Image (cartoon, rainbow, N blue to C red):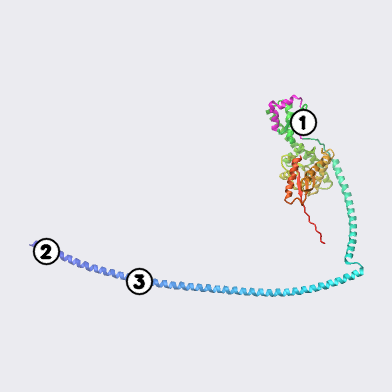
């Protein structure tokens, strides 16, 4: 019984606790919901207040921006309006200035017209006055104006001609007498004080043999020896019926000398085979090089020229083996140097310059068979290469008239060159051969269509041709020069180069009647 009461009490207590807990929880929940709703309302109110504030700020900023843009627009309008006003003012000023200038020009034109009218009237008055004066003079003198003018001019011309002719004759006679006398004295003195021996050298050399059996040994088995000699020296060996002699043929005199010395050494030695031939050729080349150097030094020493470039010394030595129309070029150069120096000393000019340019005037002939061009152009290049002075180059370049003489020394070198070549016995070429060579060149040119006249000059080194202007135009003269040069190349044999110079001229003449 007590247990049931206790259980009942426990149950009643639990039910009451549950009921009381429910009520308490309900009250707490309602309070929490109420506070949350209140916070939500507060948040909404705050948000509405902030949005109103932001809206007001944006509105104010928009109004300010619109006000600012309106102010800028008004300012730009004002500036443009001011600029337009300034432009209008400038235009108005320019128009006013143009109007003023136009008025001034019109006034000047009117004044010029008036002055022209006045001048015309004055000219008419002067013409009338002159006509009256001329008529009066013609009446007094009994001559017309043209007759008087012609008479006066004729008298003046006669007097002037007589005086001028007398004066010219007097000056010419005195100048010729003095020049001829002085020139003869200088040339005779130079020739008397200078002499040189000359030897005749050709393109062949003859080597004597002890016997005819040596020819077979020189030829060798199957021609090996002779081929070796020809290959090493570049010289042709001619072994013919000439008794006890071998002929060496070649245009290079230095190589021909090397071959001659080599062959003489082989003949003396007696051992003739390819290896021995090669040894002797090398030895002979060294000997010839030494001879060339010694001859160049000796020539410079004989003339009294110093400080020459070593290569120029060697080139001078090579001239020992070079001939021109049978005249040894080295001896000719030394002779020209002496003659030019003597004439320069007589005229009180630069003797050293004349000798130096005279010695080097034919230096181009040392390699003219190796380099294309005339010996004058080759010589100019060589002297420039080895730093010779411009005065020496000018003196050398003008000795054949290819270039203009820029000094008196250059003229003396040309004269000395002509004297050395013209001395009797100096050259083999006769006057007839010389004239025939020039005539042949002129005939080749004259037989070409379109050629009117031709003149061979510079000892046959240049031919000047006058073309027919009605047959050949300006473009055709190039072809004409080419055609004539080809004819000369095919029909003539000559050393160096021949310059073909074609000239064309058209003249129009008319008479005013």
Quadrant into which the C terminus falls: bottom right
Q: Quadrant of residue 144?
A: bottom right
Query: Would you say 311 lies left or right of 39 here?
Result: right
Q: Is residue 91 above or below residue 386?
A: below
Q: Position of residue 50 (x, y in %)?
A: 37, 71
Write down the residue under mark 3: 48
Specify the label residue 8 is tagged with.
Answer: 2
SS at badge 1: strand
Q: Nearer the viewer, residue 2 or 228?
A: 228
Quadrant into which the N terminus falls: bottom left
Q: Position of residue 315 (x, y in %)?
A: 74, 39
Write down the residue under mark 1: 206
Residue 400 highlighted magenta (yes or no): no
Q: Earlier in the sequence, mark 3 or mark 2?
A: 2
Q: Is residue 59 above or below residue 435?
A: below
Query: Disc 2 and disc 1: Cα gap in Å?
Result: 173 Å
Query: Disc 3 and disc 2: Cα gap in Å?
Result: 60 Å
Give the magenta range: 203-232
Query: Disc 3 and disc 1: Cα gap in Å?
Result: 137 Å
Residue 222 highlighted magenta (yes or no): yes
- Callout in the foreground (3, 2): 3
Q: Quadrant of residue 238?
A: top right
**Residue 436 seen in the current view:** yes
At horizontal 52% and vertical 73% (from top left) the residue drawn is 75
Q: Are marks 2 and 1 in contact (CB under 8 Å)?
A: no
Query: Would you say 250 lies left or right of 129 here?
Result: left
Q: Earlier in the sequence, mark 3 or mark 1?
A: 3
Q: Position of residue 145 (x, y in %)?
A: 88, 66
């Amino acid at each position: 019984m007590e247990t049931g009461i206790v259980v009942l009490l426990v149950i009643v207590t639990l039910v009451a606790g549950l009921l009381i807990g429910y009520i308490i929880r309900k009250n707490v929940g309602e309070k929490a919901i109420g506070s949350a709703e209140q916070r939500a309302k507060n948040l909404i109110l705050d948000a509405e207040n902030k949005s109103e504030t932001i809206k007001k700020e944006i509105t104010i900023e928009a109004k300010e921006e619109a006000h600012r843009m309106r102010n800028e627009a008004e300012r730009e309008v004002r500036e443009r309006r001011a600029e337009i006003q300034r432009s209008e003012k400038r235009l108005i000023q320019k128009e006013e200035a143009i109007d003023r200038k136009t008025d001034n020009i019109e006034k000047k034109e009117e004044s010029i017209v008036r002055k022209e009218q006045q001048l015309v009237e004055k000219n008419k008055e002067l013409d009338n006055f002159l006509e009256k004066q001329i008529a009066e003079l013609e009446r007094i003198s009994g001559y017309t104006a043209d007759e008087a003018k012609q008479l006066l001019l004729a008298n003046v011309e006669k007097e002037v001609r007589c005086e001028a002719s007398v004066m010219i004759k007097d000056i010419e006679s005195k100048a010729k007498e003095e020049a001829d006398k002085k020139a003869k004295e200088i040339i005779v003195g130079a020739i008397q004080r200078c002499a040189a021996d000359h030897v005749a050298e050709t393109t062949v050399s003859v080597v004597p043999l002890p016997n005819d059996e040596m020819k077979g040994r020189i030829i060798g088995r199957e021609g090996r020896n002779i081929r070796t000699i020809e290959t090493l020296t570049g010289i042709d060996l001619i072994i013919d019926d000439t008794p006890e002699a071998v002929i060496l043929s070649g245009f290079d005199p230095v190589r021909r000398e090397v071959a001659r010395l080599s062959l003489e050494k082989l003949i003396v030695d007696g051992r003739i085979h390819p290896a021995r031939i090669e040894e002797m050729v090398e030895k002979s080349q060294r000997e010839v090089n030494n001879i060339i150097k010694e001859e160049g030094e000796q020539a410079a020493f004989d003339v009294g020229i110093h400080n020459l470039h070593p290569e120029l010394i060697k080139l001078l030595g090579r001239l020992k083996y070079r001939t021109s129309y049978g005249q040894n070029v080295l001896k000719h150069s030394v002779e020209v140097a002496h003659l030019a120096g003597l004439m320069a000393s007589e005229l009180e000019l630069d003797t050293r310059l004349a000798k130096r340019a005279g010695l080097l005037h034919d230096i181009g002939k040392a390699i003219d068979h190796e380099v294309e061009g005339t010996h004058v152009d080759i010589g100019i290049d060589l002297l420039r290469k080895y730093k010779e002075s411009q005065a020496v180059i000018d003196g050398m370049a003008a000795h054949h008239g290819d270039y203009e003489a820029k000094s008196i020394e250059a003229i003396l070198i040309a004269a000395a060159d002509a004297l050395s070549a013209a001395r009797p016995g100096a050259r083999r070429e006769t006057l007839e051969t010389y004239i025939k060579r020039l005539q042949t060149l002129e005939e080749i040119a004259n037989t070409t269509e379109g050629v009117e006249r031709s003149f061979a000059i510079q000892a046959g080194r240049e031919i000047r041709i006058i073309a027919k202007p009605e047959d050949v135009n300006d473009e055709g003269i190039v072809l004409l020069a080419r055609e004539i040069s080809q004819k000369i190349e095919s029909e003539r044999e000559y050393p160096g180069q021949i310059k073909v110079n074609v000239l064309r001229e058209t003249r129009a003449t008319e008479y005013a009647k």
